[in-house]
Each structure stands twice: as C-alpha cells, then as structure tokens.
Amino acid sequence: MTPVETASVAAGVVLFVGGFSLLSIARRLDSGPRFWPVVGRVSRATETASGLALVFAGYHVVAYGGPAGWLTFRVPPDLAWLVFLACALAVVGTLVTDRFLGEPAEDEGGERGA
C-alpha cells in the first residue's frame, strides 16, 4: 500500500467511526435539541443526518483512495464529487431546517422577534 492509499484508508476509517459514534449519541439522547460548538442548537434529525453522511463519506473515501479492488461498490469515479456534495447538502439542509423551525436559544430570552 502506498502512503497516499494508507492516508486515504485512515481518513475514511476516522470518518466512518466518527459517523457511527454520532449516530449512537443521537440514538441514546432524549428528543430535545443539543448544543454543538460553533453551530449552536441542533435537533436529533441533524445529528442523525450528520452521522449517516460521515459514514457514507468515510466509506467512499476508502473506496476511491484505498487500494484498487478493496471496495468496488461505489459511484463511478467521474461522479465522485456528487457523493460528497450530497453528504454536505444533507447536513446543511438539516442545519437550515433547524434554524427555521428550531426553538430560540435560552440566551435570547425565550421569545421570538424580541
């Protein structure tokens, strides 16, 4: 295995494991919103979509960057950018939905428009 293939496999495994850990956290928590640093409050749906996107992206990082023949079930290489775009849009879409439908933060006084 070349150093680039090794790095691709390591990055894919990190994304894959991170996605599964996020999915397990989302499953174990109550249904209320949680706080993420930088992003703010997120719903359980956002945590689930983010976890699935990380798992999906991690698999495809290994499939495209790993040794030839390891993972052959993948989108054709010339359309690989669509895989990662779809993952990003899934996460961004749930974050935008959280902002429009979410509850106001506690530091806002609990009232909308105030």
Image (cartoon, rainbow, N blue to C red):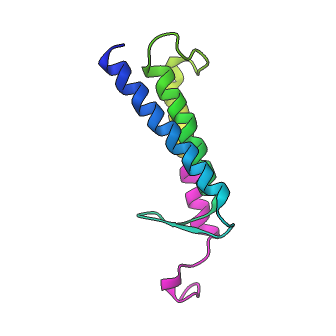
Q: Residue at x 56, y 60 (%)?
A: 96
* Outermost residue, top side: 69
- Range of residues picked out in magenta: 90-114
Q: Which is more toward the observer, 26 or 53?
A: 26
Vertical comparison of 67 with 105: above or below: above
Give coordinates of residue 49: x percent, y percent: 61, 49
Quadrant of the rendering where the N terminus is positioned: top left
Give coordinates of residue 98: x percent, y percent: 60, 64
Q: Is residue 104 left or right of residue 65?
A: right
Q: Is residue 66 visible?
A: yes
Picture quarter containing residue 104?
A: bottom right
Q: Residue at x 61, y 49 (%)?
A: 23
Vertical comparison of 52 with 8: above or below: below
Q: Is residue 82 visible?
A: no
Whether 9 is among the magenta residues is: no
Q: Residue at x 56, y 50 (%)?
A: 22
Q: Residue at x 47, y 10 (%)?
A: 68
Helix, strand or loop: magenta stretch: helix
Give coordinates of residue 6: x percent, y percent: 36, 22
Whether 100 is among the magenta residues is: yes
Q: Is residue 39 left or right of residue 100?
A: left
Picture quarter containing residue 94?
A: bottom right
Give coordinates of residue 24: x percent, y percent: 62, 51
Q: Which is more toward the observer, 75 or 66?
A: 66
Picture quarter containing residue 7?
A: top left
Marker count (numbered): 0
* Outermost residue, left side: 3
Q: Is residue 41 left or right of residue 14?
A: right
Q: Which is more toward the observer, 60 or 102?
A: 60
